[in-house]
Image (cartoon, helix red, strand yellow):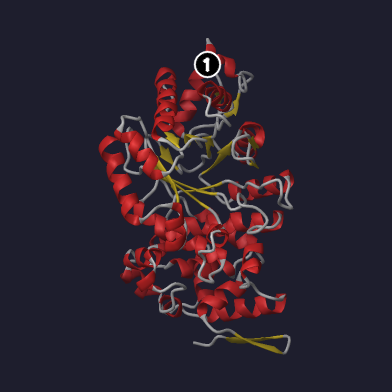
Amino acid sequence: MNLSAKVYNKSFTFKSVKEVLAKANEEKSGDMLAGIGAESASERVAAKLVLSRLTLEDIYNNPVIPYEIDEVTRVIYDGLNIAIYNKFKNYTLGQLRDYILDSDTTNEDLKQLGRGLTSEMIAGVAKIMSNLDLVYAAKKMRIQAHCNTTIGVPGTLAFRNQPNHPTDSVPGIMASIKEGLSFGSGDAVIGINPVEDNAETVKRQLEAVKEFMHKWEIPTQACVLAHVTTQMKAVELGAPADLIFQSIAGTQAANDAFGVTAEILTEAYALAERKGTGTGPNLLYFETGQGSEISLECHHGVDEMTLEARTYGFGRKFKPFMVNNVSGFIGPETIYDGREVIRADMEDLFMGKLHGLPMGIAPCYTNHMKADQNDQEIGTMLCAMAGANYFMGVPGGDDVMLSYQDTSYHDDASVREILGLRPLPEFEKWLEKMGIMEDGRLTKMAGDPSIFDK
């Protein structure tokens, strides 16, 4: 295994596969903060050259965190399809990139391939891909999942209606839900981030949303994004949860900080099967994002992009209905500016899809980042072109509870119209019945939430 390369007559030698992966990453402020990023453009190019020549077997034999000490590593390796891995193990990452980008390689080919790749392999190939490569490759893959409805249907783009409220006011939440639905946003899920993380709040909010869904016969899913154990308590109390949510990470230490393990997620799925209101079989909702492990000082010297890939490797064990990436949510200590967050969005969408996950993207940013709405809109359009299953729908694009910027109900409608995409089929029929949409376009009634007060 050769870990050396020469660039502009300067030789670079790396100590490990872990270091090569870190140095080959596009510049991210989190990696620089952790002291593991490339110190120059030349070093980054040298690391990419070394990485492109490594075989999948080299990567397999050198996990960035040892199997013996990390549950995430164990989940990734224990779930690997060894027959598929053996078929490709002699490929270099450069050859793997060529195979993925070959116009003859199909969606089904890539879905099979991903089952034989560890997360470090998937991160590695993404590091030697350009932005256009990532969009092209991600577009090839269409991953579907079913809760009450099916997400990922070809030709569709769904949205999470995110009606957060700074005091958990149910009337305030319902007002936002109505506005979002009136713009055609909510077919992915109606998902609320509560301020108070307790079972009573979760139950109260779910009951209000589900009552509204039943009254208006809305074909979608409902979820309150409290901690997984809080939601489990609420379900035990009779809360009508279609999905159970949890944030996950790419190291055992970070998951410990989140208060989650594979065992807990297995129990959550079993509870959702037994007492939840979702049809299934996909009953979990995960949120991820580059930088969480570094912000928690749980990164083990691994770069934030590779850790994000490992998060997907952990999450795919549980066959979720949705995975939402929020790489711009933490701030400039992990993703500094618009350029970094746009790159992260495309990396994450590609890596998640190659893991076989039904990926959505929140091309979001915080106000203390060097990013603005134009950066967000560029990321949104690129990820829509790359086949994201869904985006967020936030009133005015400004989440008043979480204090960050995300896609608005208006953005959602614009992206659908620009790319000729439709809502999920059942939801579009409902929108037509309500007079909100006709032949895939919003009508003059769109944007008027008072239609739900009649």
**Residue 30 appearing in the image:** yes
Closer to the camera in the image, 71 or 273 = 71
Q: Is residue 270 above or below residue 294?
A: above
| Residue for point 55% across, 66% down | 126
Determine the secondary structure under disc 1.
helix
Closer to the camera in the image, 124 or 190 = 190
* Quadrant position of residue 443: top right
Closer to the camera in the image, 116 or 254 = 254
Closer to the camera in the image, 179 or 416 = 179
Instruction: List the residue tagged with mark 1.
Output: 452
| Residue for point 39% across, 55% down | 316
User: Residue 144: horizontal and vertical position, in percent?
Assistant: 41, 46
- Which three-letter amino acid code belongs to the residue tagged 1? Phe
**Residue 26 appearing in the image:** no
Q: Is residue 377 above or below residue 338?
A: above
Q: Is residue 207 above or below residue 452?
A: below
User: Residue 382: horizontal and vertical position, in percent?
Assistant: 63, 50
- 5 lies left or right of 107: right
| Residue for point 46% across, 44% down | 152
- 393 lies left or right of 221: right
* Residue farthest left in this picture: 274
User: Residue 334: horizontal and vertical position, in percent?
Assistant: 63, 59
- 11 lies left or right of 204: right
